[in-house]
Image (spheres, rainbow, N blue to C red):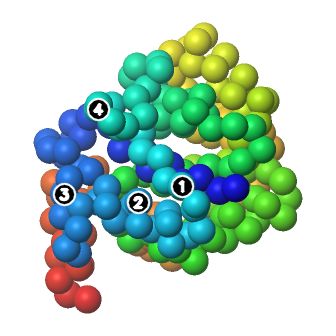
Amino acid sequence: MLYGLVLAGGQSSRMGQDKAQLQFDGQSLLARATALLGASGCQEVLVSRNQSGFIQDIVVNAGPLGGIHAALAQTPNGVALLVLPVDMPFMDAPRLQALVDAGKAHGRPSYFDDCFLPLYLPVSQAAKDFLGDLLANEGQGRVRRLLDHLDAIALPCPPAPLLQNLNTPADWQQATRSETLS
């Protein structure tokens, strides 16, 4: 079984407003990411968002790994997570499906080279234990450490702007300008 996970728990401090609620092509970034995961084959979509009604971080201020850690605590071993940040509006279902296909074929996590999110992550006790230990000892960490530990597969990067994160108002203005031009 494949679960989707939208990472929408950040503070949006560089953007100055809640990125998940920004409207892009007629829908919020949160609704867009949720729909994209569904279109990529996810039977259920979880949302990591430090608000009531969503998955909330167990370890506070742990960044993306905090959201992944909290989701792993709620998912059984033997399923997989397809993890997507909320602020990647240009990502598409075929690229996400490529991560799933590569990960399933090799039985390991997969990601795009030099860009550690989005990612495909088989849920295992080894992943849960490593991430729990990493966050307990350091309080935070990098997604790359998890991927390296689990011997993840790096796929070639898709063309720009698919992996572009929208972190600042300037990023947002450029993205919405591109949206109106297309």
**Which residue is pictured at 47% across the width and 20% down the height?**
58
The kind of secondary structure element at disc 1 is: strand
Q: CA distance from mark 2 to mark 4?
A: 17 Å
Disc assigned to residue 22: 3
Evaluate if marks 2 and 4 touch, with contact meaning CB atoms under 8 Å apart. no
Q: Which residue is mark 2?
A: 34
> At label 3, which amino acid type do we have?
Leu
Circle 4 residue: 51
Tell me, yes or no, if residue 174 can be seen here.
no
Specify the quadrant of the image occupied by residue 17: top left
Where, quadrant-wise, is the N terminus in this rendering? bottom right
Q: Earlier in the sequence, mark 4 or mark 1?
A: 1
Going by the numbered disc 4, the residue's amino acid type is Gln
**Residue 46 location (% of width, % of height):** 47, 47
Closest to the camera, between mark 2 and mark 1, is: 1
| Mark 2 or 1, nearer chain start | 2
Q: What is the three-letter code of the residue carrying label 1?
A: Glu
Q: Are marks 4 and 3 in contact (CB under 8 Å)?
A: no
Residue 2: image quadrant is: bottom right
The answer to which of 23 and 144 lies nearer the viewer is 23
Q: Quadrant of the C terminus?
A: bottom left
Horizontally, is 69 left or right of 46 in the view? right
Q: To which residue does mark 1 refer?
A: 44
Q: Residue at x 71, y 25 (%)?
A: 130
**Element under disc 2:** helix
